[in-house]
Amino acid sequence: VGDGLEGIRDTIALAGNRLTVSAGVGLQATDVRPLYDSGVREFHLSGRMPVRSIHISHLYSMDYYRTSHVLVSDVVNALRQITAPDGH
């Protein structure tokens, strides 16, 4: 997240209420706080984790993924800690 935070902050400041910035793509629990502090209020994630890769040839392989309930739960809990009325 680090390098993109300034751009996210600038985009949110310029857009005001005309645009909603949603964070996603590889989102981890450790990303929630810095993104929230930058003004992001919507988060999207598939929570996918690689399961296996099948190499069909030296030119082609297929990757298989599944949704990790642990990854999704970690992100949700990180957001709850930030947004809870008492901060816990």
Image: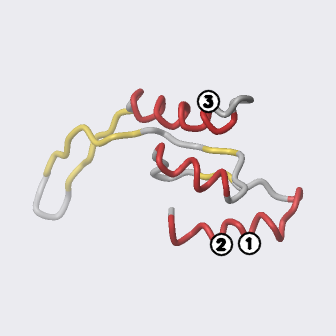
Q: Residue at x 64, y 72 (%)?
A: 6
Residue hosting label 2: 7
Residue 10, placed above or below residue 41:
below
Residue hosting label 1: 10
Residue 85, placed above or below residue 60:
above
In the displayed structure image, the side of residue 71 where residue 64 appears, left or right: left
Going from the N terminus, do you reach mark 1 or mark 3 first? 1
Tell me, for residue 84, which label it has, or none.
none
- How far across and how far down the image is residue 16, in percent? 87, 62
Q: Amino acid at mark 2?
A: Gly
Q: CA distance from mark 3 to mark 2?
A: 29 Å
Q: Residue at x 54, y 31 (%)?
A: 77
**Dot 1 and dot 2 residues touching (CB under 8 Å):** yes
Q: Secondary structure at mark 3?
A: loop
Between 37 and 7, the one lying in front of the other is: 37
Tell me, for residue 88, which label it has, or none.
3
In the displayed structure image, the side of residue 46 where residue 18 appears, left or right: right
Q: Amino acid at mark 3?
A: His
Residue 28, placed above or below residue 38:
above
